[in-house]
Structures are given as structure tokens and as C-alpha cells.
Amino acid sequence: MRFTVTDLLMKKKEKQKITMLTAYDYPFAHLVDEAGIDMILVGDSLSMVVQGNETTLPVTMDDMLYHTKIVVKSTKRAMVVADMPFMSYQVSIEEAVRNAGRLIKEAGAHAVKLEGGREILSHVKAITEAEIPVIGHLGLTPQAFLRMGGYRLQGKTEEQAKRIIEDALRLQDKGAVAIVLEVIPSELAKEITESLEIPTIGIGAGVHCDGQVLVIHDLLGLFEKFTPKFVKKYANLREDVLKAIIKYKEEVEKGEFPDKEHSF
Ligand code: KIV
């Protein structure tokens, strides 16, 4: 049985922590599902950790459809959330509903995630009215990289914090089923979490959120360009993979591979 929106809301009510990780392909989606993680986010971080771009901005609807389809096919239990990429929902409400619908209908996602607050309330309402579960995303919203001038802590001033709290309440009001809070002070995340009936899922937002999400390449030590303060590396796969590849190269060059055991 897949983890559903009902399970999500139940976990909040029963004060059980929600687990979420990103995945973009068969090997990782399969492992994340096997480990019993509640929700898999096919994040637009795909652009950076899989496609090697500097920001999340270049990733397209076609890319998201392709990867979401693979993740859905590779999993049995987790709820699969597809990120709506930059410019797939900002232009008009109609486009937002159409593109959210494509992620559900063509790729098989179980929910979509959109970045932003008051600017996208009508979009969230319209997508929800099309019976598609929406997850909001507030605080550091990487699609606003150019306007924000980098990836920085958000909600530091009283005014900024007030705006994020108001946005969270408005998103809930328009039908969002959960909200990702990215890189905001822990105390602000606590206040938001306590004010909402829907769960908050934090990334760099402290321990008080109802759940946590990380980019799997960060958690496994596979992304070398930069490591934000909130990332805990549970493994250093980059080093292991590099060692394995260098060993293979050496063995091929010395004529040690393939040996008898690996030949017919
Ligand atoms: O794209 C992504 O991976 C995300 C997470 C950082 C929440 O939006």
C-alpha cells in the first residue's frame, strides 16, 4: 500500500515524524522505497545533482516527466511527489493546472510541489480543485535564486518571518496538504509547525518540523560542489566510487582484469 495524503495528515496528528528523500532514477528510488521512507521527492534539484547545472532553473517539464515516471515505476510504498519546474506554473493558472495534471496523468506522481507563497495562491487553489494534492515550499526557494542573489538563510528579520508565517497559513487555506520549509531559523519553523494543521517538512529548518527531507546525493556524499550547513553526510559514496573506478582502470591497464574467474 502506498503512503497517502491521509497517512501524511495522520502522522502530523499523531506526532510521528515524516521521512522524505529525493530520488530521480531506478537504483536510488528502489533503495529509498525499500528503506521505508514515506515520501520520495523527484526534486528539481535533479538539475544540479544529476544534470550538473549550476541552479535548478534549466530543468524542463519533459525532464521531470521522464524522471518521475521512472521513480513511480521503481517504487511500491512511497508517495511520489513531483516538483513543478521553473516556468511550468508561474505564467498562468491554466498552465499550472495543465502541467500539474501531466505530472499526475503521464508520469504517475501522487502529488506536486510548487515554490512560493502569496504569488501562487490561486494556482494552488486551482490545482487542488483539479483533485491534485499540492505541497507548498517556503523559505529558501531555489527557483528564486536570481532574485535572492544566492542560497541564503530566509526569515531572519521580523518582517520576513511574519511574511513566511502568513504565506504558510494562506497555502493551507488554499488546500496545500503539506509545506516544505527550507533554510529558515528553527524557532520560526517551530512557530509555523505549531500554527498549521498540515505537516511541515524541513530542510535546514531544524528539528521541530513534522518531517525532514534531504537531497539523496547530499546524504550519500555524492555531490561535491558545495555542502550546505544543514546537510549531514551519512556516507561518502563519492570516495568509494572514485576508488573503485581507479582500481578498475589500473587492473585493465595491467591486464589483471578480466581474470579467470570473470572469463568463459
Ligand atoms: O528540489 C529539491 O530537491 C527540493 C528539496 C530541496 C526540498 O525542492
Image (tube, rainbow, N blue to C red):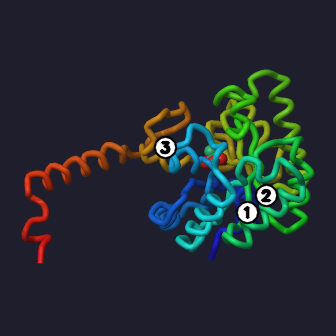
Q: How crowded is mark 1: few (under 14 residues within 10 Å), some or many (20 or more)?
A: many
Q: Where's the N terminus, which quadrant?
A: bottom right
Point out which mark residue 111 bears: 1
Q: How crowded is mark 2: few (under 14 residues within 10 Å), some or many (20 or more)?
A: many
| Relative height, residue 144 to residue 80 (above, below) | above
Counting residues from the N terminus, which is met first, the one under dot 3 or under dot 2? 2
> Is residue 203 left or right of 171 when viewed as pictured?
left
Viewer-nearest residue: 93 or 186 = 93
Counting residues from the N terminus, which is met first, the one under dot 1 or under dot 2? 1
Q: Tag 3's secondary structure?
A: helix
Whether pointer 3 and pointer 1 mark residues with C-beta atoms closer than 8 Å, the reply is no
**What's the CA distance linking mark 3 and mark 2?**
25 Å
> Is residue 110 left or right of 161 when viewed as pictured?
left
Q: What residue type is labelled 2?
A: Val
Q: Tag 2's secondary structure?
A: strand
* Residue under numbered circle 2: 134
Point out which mark residue 218 bears: 3
**What's the CA distance linking mark 3 and mark 1?**
23 Å
Q: Tag 1's secondary structure?
A: strand
| Relative height, residue 76 to residue 111 (above, below) | below
Whether pointer 1 and pointer 2 mark residues with C-beta atoms closer than 8 Å, the reply is yes
